[in-house]
Amino acid sequence: MSVLALHDVAVQLRPEDNVAVVAKPLSAETIIQANGDKITLSSRIGMGHKLALKAIKKGEAVYKYGQIIGFASKDIAPGDWVHVHNVVAEAFERDYAFCRDCPPPPAAVSGRTFLGYDRGPDRPEPYRYGTRNYIAVISTVNCSAQTSKYITQRFNATELLKKYPNVDGVVAITHKAGCAMQFDGSDHNQLDRTLAGFAKHANVAAYILIGLGCETGQAMHLVEGQGLVQLKINHGSQQRTGPIVLSIQECGGIGKTVEAGVKAVAELLPRFSDIRRTELSAKHLILGTNCGGSDGNSGVTANPALGVASDMLVAQGGTSILGETPEIYGAEHLLTRRAISREVGEKLIERIKWWEWYTGIFGAEINNNPSPGNKEGGLTTIYEKSLGAIAKAGSTAMVDVVQYAQPVLAKGFVVMDTPGYDPVSMTGIVAGGANVCVFTTGRGSVFGCKPSPSIKVATNSPLYHHMIDDMDIDAGVILNGTPVEVVGKQIFEEILAVASGKHTKSEINGVGEEEFAPWSIGPTL
């Protein structure tokens, strides 16, 4: 049997790693030349899964990315398949070394632009500069969700919108919450913050609020607590007014509310259809990053490439947001070392400790985070998943850590505390101001999130070609020798193109309304 070179069939990410990531399926008895030794595979190993390069005794650490991803639960021989059957995620000490490796600001690069919408000085950061032009119908409570959809359907299912080609659509922002929660409690205020983030969003030209009337999440609590205003345009002048609020109970039922809502939106459309895209600096882009349906190649191809694009945007003066705190767990020490100050680093650790407490009160384990699909794709522990996930954040300094759906004001790389569940995570990131998103996937997530466009990056070429109608970029070419930097630049150029109006695959497929999913952290009463 011929001997294959390691670099032809797998990727050893760091010289100190005792495992390599398989780039294509390998059969049992395959012989590989690795680091001067010949290794014979003891079993079949699938793409994205790990191959032992040397003997790892029971209890010894397994290294990938030059970091601990778990510990051997039994002796592992060179050539063995390394996965959940022989690796466990034991607790281990992490040296946070706050600010020790904080990099200097990247060399400033200017001149890159996109064609977007400048909402004017009445819109505070981060909600001034948009990449889309939507009218939103926002439900304060699940009880008004269907009514909100009826209103939007009257526009999106007719020829009416064709009269307003500069409006991207009328989108319903609906959810399953809004009541049965502590009035003015943490869930109530977090929901208000999230809804307000979408109402104020730079990609939303105007909005109306639809409530039932008796819910805990009263519209006026939202309006007054979050300082909501409506920007109206009359004969070229701008006027700030209170938002349009409709209550099903006050209007006299669903039918009358729909008619009132349709009338309100019809009056808004012509006022915002004349807005034109204008050339804007790339520093006004706020990038939301996420990974879902991950596999063993996520941290090898798509996520590092997205990290390159994130660094390029930060160098332009823009912002990149990393979420999914449970998927930072086990790798947080690498981010605290990049913190711009100890205070910022401590904010991340406080969130990590909170998640340990939060999962503990329910008897859950953070290490249970890798889903069955993640594990089938080659991810073994949360530590491994996290080390690959944070690659999306590139290499610049961590300048801030913010709460869920909190407006992101800092320029540079920012962490937002969100769950790992994709729709909930991205909802918070978009509410925080992300006006364009990049979503990496190894198993095939089809996520979209109106009003912000979502660019899909496949971690491997078979997935990209199999789901060509849903994937925007193939990062799997990295496994065939294309440099990570080349794909990173491709992602950055796609960000600019999409920000300028190019439709993503999710937009072409009409995906993005049902994925709005605010995070509920407390009891349902």
Image (tube, rainbow, N blue to C red):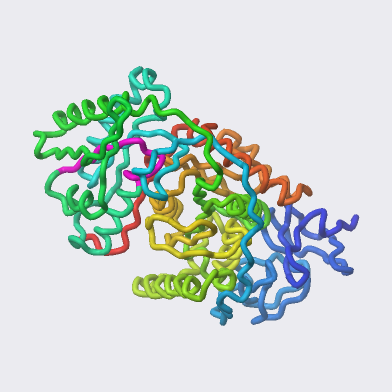
* Residue 262: percent from left, percent from top: 23, 27
Residue 257 shown left or right of residue 361 in the figure: left
Q: Residue at x 55, y 70 (%)?
A: 339
Q: Foreground residue, 269 or 471?
A: 269
Span of residues in magenta = 198-212
Residue 252: x and y in percent read 9, 34
Between 521 and 192, the one lying in front of the other is 192
Point out the image quarter for the N terminus.
bottom right
User: Residue 383: x percent and y percent?
Assistant: 57, 69
Vertical arrangement, residue 290 with respect to residue 79, above or below = above
Q: In which quarter of the image is residue 300?
A: bottom right
Quadrant of res 384 = bottom right
Q: What residue sits 75% from the left and 59% below the top?
A: 11
Can you see residue 246? yes
Quick check: is 362 in the magenta stretch? no
Q: In this view, does 367 lie above or below 376?
A: below
Residue at 33% across / 33% down in the picture? 135
Q: Is residue 503 visible?
A: no
